[in-house]
Amino acid sequence: MTIVIILLIIVAIIAALRMRRVVSDRAAETSQDFPVVTPPGTRDLDEETAARPEIDAMALASARATVSQEVPDEVLKDVLLDATPQQAARLFAGVSHEVMAGAIGEQTSGVHIQGHAGADDLAKLDNLSSAVDDLDFWNFGEDKPA
């Protein structure tokens, strides 16, 4: 009886090790679907107008496959300067539709930028300007001699 129990334990250990190897092999296969591309980075760029490094076409295609089509290619290229395609996908997945629409210039609801202001909008702005005038934030204290 003890020999059967020991034999079952050995078979269970062998099966667990085999399953572990199969899982790790599958994980290695799926990670090869998206090659790891190191982003060029913007750390060494001195100015905003400095020449930007070229983005790898495979990285752009990989990011485009996982990121919403609403994101313009120029924005996606700028993100890929400092992030991998997988990081870009996680970044854009966390952005709500309303925020994304506002960022790319589509109007959702709320304040409309185009057109003329109505009477109630002007009244709100007038009340706001008088409230700012009432603030005493321009008083930085009295000058004290050194």
Image: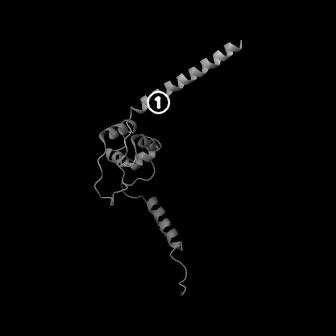
User: Is 19 above or below relative to 94?
Assistant: above
At a point 34% along the width and 40% down the height, the residue shown is 59
Instruction: Please name the amino acid that badge 1 sits on.
Output: Ala
Residue positioned most to the bottom: 145
At a point 40% along the width and 46% down the height, the residue shown is 83
* Viewer-side residue, 27 vs 140: 27
Q: Position of residue 109 (x, y in %)?
A: 45, 48
Q: Position of residue 17 (x, y in %)?
A: 55, 24
* Viewer-side residue, 146 vs 125: 146
Q: Position of residue 70 (x, y in %)?
A: 37, 41
User: Is 51 above or below relative to 143?
Assistant: above
Can see residue 100?
A: yes
At a point 53% along the width and 23% down the height, the residue shown is 19
Can see residue 104?
A: no
Q: Position of residue 127 (x, y in %)?
A: 50, 66
Name the residue that disc number 1 marks. 27
At a point 57% along the width and 23% down the height, the residue shown is 16
Residue positioned most to the right: 1
In the picture provided, is 71 more to the left or to the right than 143? left
Quarter residue 119 falls in: bottom left
* Viewer-side residue, 124 vs 79: 79
In the picture provided, is 27 more to the left or to the right than 8? left
